[in-house]
Amino acid sequence: MTSALFIEQLLNGVQFGVMLFLIASGLTLVFGIMNFINLAHGSLYMTGAFAAAATQAATGSFLAAILVGMIVAAIVGLLLEQAVLRRFYGRSHLDQVLATFGLILIMNETTRILFGSTPLRMNLPGALSGSVEILPGVPYPAFRLAILAVGLLVAGALYVIIMKTRMGMWVRAGASNRAIAAAMGVNVPLVFAGLFAVGAAFAGLAGLMAGPILSVQVGMGEPILILALVVTVIGGIGSIRGAFVAALMVGVVDTFGRVLLTPALGSMVIFMLMAAILAFRPKGLFAVHG
Amino acid sequence: MADLSAAPRKTRDWIAPAVLVALLALVPPISLALDDPFLVKVAMRVVVFAIVAVALDLVVGFGGLVSLCHAGLLGVGGYVVAILAFHDFNAEPIFGLLPGTSNLAVTLPLGALTAALVAVVVGAISLRTSGPYFIMITLAFNQMFYYAAVALQKYGGEDGLQIMSAITLGPLDVSNRYRFFYVALAGLALTLLVITRMASSRFGIILRAAAANETRVVAVGVAPWAYRLVAFTVSGFFAGMAGALLAASQQFISPVDMAWDRSGDFVVMAVLGGVATVWGPVVGAAAFIVLELVLSSWSQHWHLAFGLLILMVVIFLRGGLADLAHVFRPRAAGGGHG
């Protein structure tokens, strides 16, 4: 592997990692605060991508697509949370897995009814369609660099909000002990509903950014959901820092695994990594709960 | 979920499984009488999936551990049968040493044992974690097996592996669909027998007690880990056996049979039928497959109805279809889904 190829793949890995982080950040906080497994989180990723692709087809504007994609994902997420998911916070994990498994079927099929089975295409905005020479002789697609920048920006903003603001304090309090946080006067259901909407918007953002690279199709949410779950548990459920570290790790390992080995063997490496980490640290790298 | 009051009550508990097996045994004659081979094909799927659902129930219903890797374990059993048949057909020794075989008397136990061996390893690692971590790590293992099957380029990779040779069972030729059905049904009967025995034994009581309240079980001096590992391994054994039967019945196995949503389907089957009884998942598997057939004949968008149905069952019928029988009876105190 030449150093140019190495740098390119490393950037691909980090870019994939920040995208995973966008999805996993919502997942890990929902998981951490409500002790709730949401298998349908990947559906919000899909929702964002479809809403954005439809908007772009209608208006031709990529910026409008980004806004609509995120807003629609947030609204759908909030609706799901209020109408269905809330009923399951106090239930067993088995019930949660089943309910959200059912939701995946519902969301996928509804999307298929609305948009059909043919994958939609998203076009890159003119300014981002070229490539940038990051190092002499190493061109890199501008759009992927943009994803990288957006992902890092969101991660930075999240870090500041979660670690430095009062609202973030509520979230962290909820994640480490919901009952005590509620007793201390934190309105956990409200914080949580807001958090869910933001997490959904981030998942939608990841989906719409993946749109021009992969294709926008029904079922696109599940493979990425599984990787986001891997990120969540490797990082430690409820830990935003853990999710960031784990997302970059998974992104880079997955990318190099696919390049150095066959795609199938490369995909196995991630799950071996997860099994190995959980075997030695059963609560993930940055355990939040005890 | 772990309801000690629902502990099996001797002979009465054999009635339901015996009736279910007897009903399934009637399918081939009916299918012959109606000259409708499709019926047996459907029943075959019911039997194979019922074996996995019953095996999964030991872990999910009695052990309180939600496993999402049973499709993967099924695939292990299936691939053992298909790969051995592949080497038999091509007259090419495995690793240049052992000859392949299409004899289920060899490959069926081998498939089940291989899956059990895999389950010991998966269980030993996964059971170090608990709750949601357990669910996720078993999901990861399922994906690992899935991609491992895709990586088997020599054995068809993503396209799966066709069994070209005629499958036999000892001296018997079981390529006849009707005859093979009874082989699979015997497998289901065995599964029900073993798991009902296990569930009602001291072993089963500890398994359920640990699911209901782990702290108390530890406090009386029992470490649940070994019990859970045994349950997971036995469960893996039967999932592998089901996979071997599936591969032999459809003369084919592919990574699609091991996809993670299939693992989810198995959990749905177990819960649909009711996890509090050993036989409930048989009803669940039958209901699942019949629903799938009926709904898909109505509309290509049947997944929507199916998803809604799953959601409704989880919200309203928490004990599964088996709960319908209890709706008119006062329920025992305690228990229920934790």
Image: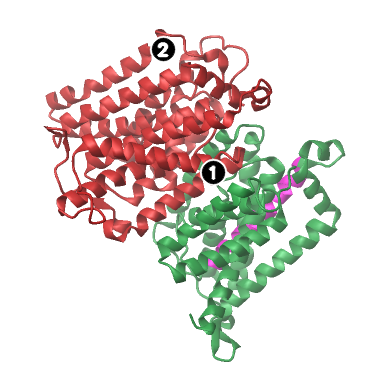
Chain colours: A green, B red
Q: Mark 2 lies on which chain?
A: B
Judge left or right: residue B175 versus residue B211. Answer: left
**Mark 2 burial class by Cα count in 10 Å: few <14, some 14-19, many 20+:** some
Judge left or right: residue B107 versus residue A60. Answer: left
> What kind of element bears circle 2?
helix
Q: Does the magenta stretch include residue A95?
A: no
**Quadrant position of residue A15:** bottom right
> What kind of element bears circle 1?
helix
User: What is the quadrant of the N terminus of chain B in the image?
Assistant: top right
- What residue is rendered at 83% in x and 51% in y? A169
The spot of residue A55 in percent (x, y) is: 55, 65
Q: Which of marks 2 and 1 is nearer the N terminus?
A: 2
- Viewer can see residue B245: no
Of residues A82 and B213, the one drawn nearer to the viewer in this rendering: B213
- Viewer can see residue B272: yes
Q: Which amino acid does label 1 sit on?
A: Ile
Q: Which chain carries label 1?
A: B
Evaluate whether label 2 is on the same chain as label 1. yes
**Mark 1 burial class by Cα count in 10 Å: few <14, some 14-19, many 20+:** many
Q: How many labels does the image show?
A: 2
Judge left or right: residue A173 versus residue B322. Answer: right
Q: Is residue A56 above or below residue A126?
A: above
Residue contact at pointers 2 and 1, CB within 8 angstroms: no
Q: Is the stretch drawn in magenta largely helix, strand or loop?
A: helix
The spot of residue A105 in percent (x, y) is: 47, 45
Q: What stretch is highlighted in magenta?
A: A189-211
Q: Is residue B233 above or below residue A124?
A: above
Q: What residue type is labelled 2?
A: Asp
**Quadrant position of residue B168:** top left
- Residue beneath label 1, please? B125
- Residue beneath label 2, please? B13
